[in-house]
Image (cartoon, rainbow, N blue to C red):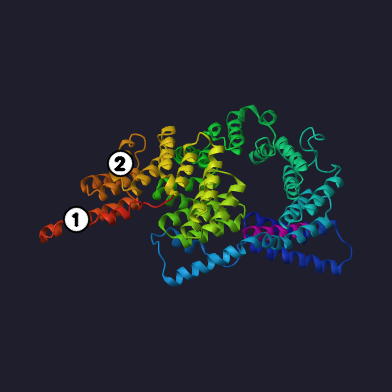
Amino acid sequence: MNEASRIADHAARLVEIGDIDAALVVAAAGLAFISNSLRRNLNVNNNITQAQAQLLYVRGQCLRIRAISHVPGGLATTHTDLLSATLSSTSSYNNNASQQLSTATTKAAVTTNSNAAAAATAARPALDAFTAALRLVPNSQVYAEAAADAAIACNSPKQALYFLSSVNSKNGFGTAPTATNSSNGRGGTSLRACILMAKAYKALNMPAKFKDCLWNIVRIEPLALDSLKSLINLGESLDAIVPYIPEIHRPWVVPLLAAHEASLECNFKDAKKIAHCHVKEGNNIMANYAFEQASPLIRKLDPQNTKYMDQYARVLQTQGTLFQLNRLATDMVAVSENHPETWLVMARYCETKGSLDRAMQLTEKALKLNSRHMESYLLKGALQLALHLPQEAISSFKIAHEMSPSLESYRGLMEAYVACKRTKEALSVAKESLKKMPENARAIVLVGCVLSNMPERRAQAQATFKKALSLDPKCTEALYALASSLVNESKYQAAADLLQSNLIHINNHIAHTRLGDIYAVLKNFDAAMEHYNIALKIDAGYGAAKIGFERVEKMIGRMEDMDDDGTGGGGGENGAADDLDAEGGRNF
């Protein structure tokens, strides 16, 4: 083995162990060595050519890795600083820090649309290196696939197809295999090549070619779930897909695909066993249960898994389980900082702690990693609503809804339209969700929420909430919305009776906290303290219950002081009434 080959092998080993900087240095030294050798000796040895191509390939690999992990300036933060800032108990910042966060968030929003161009620019040097390697060794499938991958990253799908088809032609394989000309799915083309072709045809908006490539992927790898789901998205029937799935895997793959097929039409009734389908229909209690059942198994099979963890965070946030959300955020940071799910989980935690600016910053970071991350747009819309930016929230929720319609996207649009006083559009969105999900109590609640913002139709709103509650007695949204409606009419005892009678179905820390708030308004302090205590036994970290408990203690203390002074009791009802929704969140 000559010196050039030894240098090339050394550079390749450095890439394997992840020392990218050293690999780039060695590759540069090796290419310089070869260049000097060629100048001294015009007889080009085949080993020299192979070594030169390998070094160019290593250089391309290193540059590609850097491009993928590149984070645009302005939001770069060290792991330690970001973790300590995000997971600390401090939920407020000084004025200077708040201003910096606001500026960074605004800058991030302005630069979001340029992410694709920035990614393409970052990938260009890698593409040049891979192309040079392919010129030296035109028959290399590895170099062709690497060049095609970089070309797709540079928004040049036609160039990617050229690389793949030319090397296949040189190797006698012809062009990309199709569903009709490939009996074994390979046709001489590797799985990676098929995946790259699929990406290229999708980018070129050629659905027929895209579908052919998906079928070839499935023939090579029958458990390629993303490809199976994409085929369903393109209208292929489950019956046509099932024969390609090995029988041993059908018991779990087929229900998952059936759930996906049903969820495309918002038919969540036929998708009950899949956690993310529960999330899409807004059934957070069942989603939480499904995630709790599935997460240990998923983590055991794949400790690095991040998929659906952003949805799990939303469920935990809705359930008010701050401790579990904190733990999930910490786990996600340990797993990966290069996935949008990690930053979104952390953003959910920050929002729950009341750090809206930090939550927005982290949401923007998630979108920089994946500009088509649906969950990020849902949270961005919610944060914009909380920051009194309803018009901007409409845009965010619309993007999320176009990607994947769900109860949360319908709800976000409804709330944003209501905030903009566009009641007609809000009612139209709510009715559309009900049309899509006629047996979903939460969709009925959306309609009721719009009606409750129309003074002349508040009685109809209460009837709508009751209808939802009769359809699903465990629908927390219906119960809380009906109770809030009664409170808004100062019917405190009726609201307390409603919550008390439904504890048989909905017996959680939020329900007990609301009961405590109402009894505080009614000056039944013993009952209020009892329910706050129950809430804190269920979730010791639930902030709304702590606040309510402390508020009632102060009210009792003031009344005792007044009795000692002989000035009598009274007062305090308005203060308690103003805090009836102290638990925050978006639970109606």
The residue tagged 2 is 494
Residue 19 horizontal side relative to residue 214, left or right? left
User: What amino acid type is highlighted by mark number 2?
Assistant: Ala
Label annotation for residue 570: 1
Q: Main secondary structure of the magenta part?
A: helix
- For the point 76% across and 39% down, the residue is 212
Mark 2 or 1, nearer chain start: 2
Expressed as whole percent of the image width and height from the top left, the position of residue 78 reads: 52, 64
Q: Which of the 4 image quarters holds residue 404?
A: top right
Residue 400 horizontal side relative to residue 160, left or right? left
Label annotation for residue 257: none
Expressed as whole percent of the image width and height from the top left, the position of residue 34 reads: 80, 65
Judged from the image, the secondary structure of the residue bearing numbered disc 2 is helix
Expressed as whole percent of the image width and height from the top left, the position of residue 133 reads: 79, 57
Q: Which residue is most to the right?
A: 43
Residue 22 horizontal side relative to residue 383, left or right? right
Q: Which of the 4 image quarters holds residue 180?
A: top right
Magenta part of the chain: 53-69
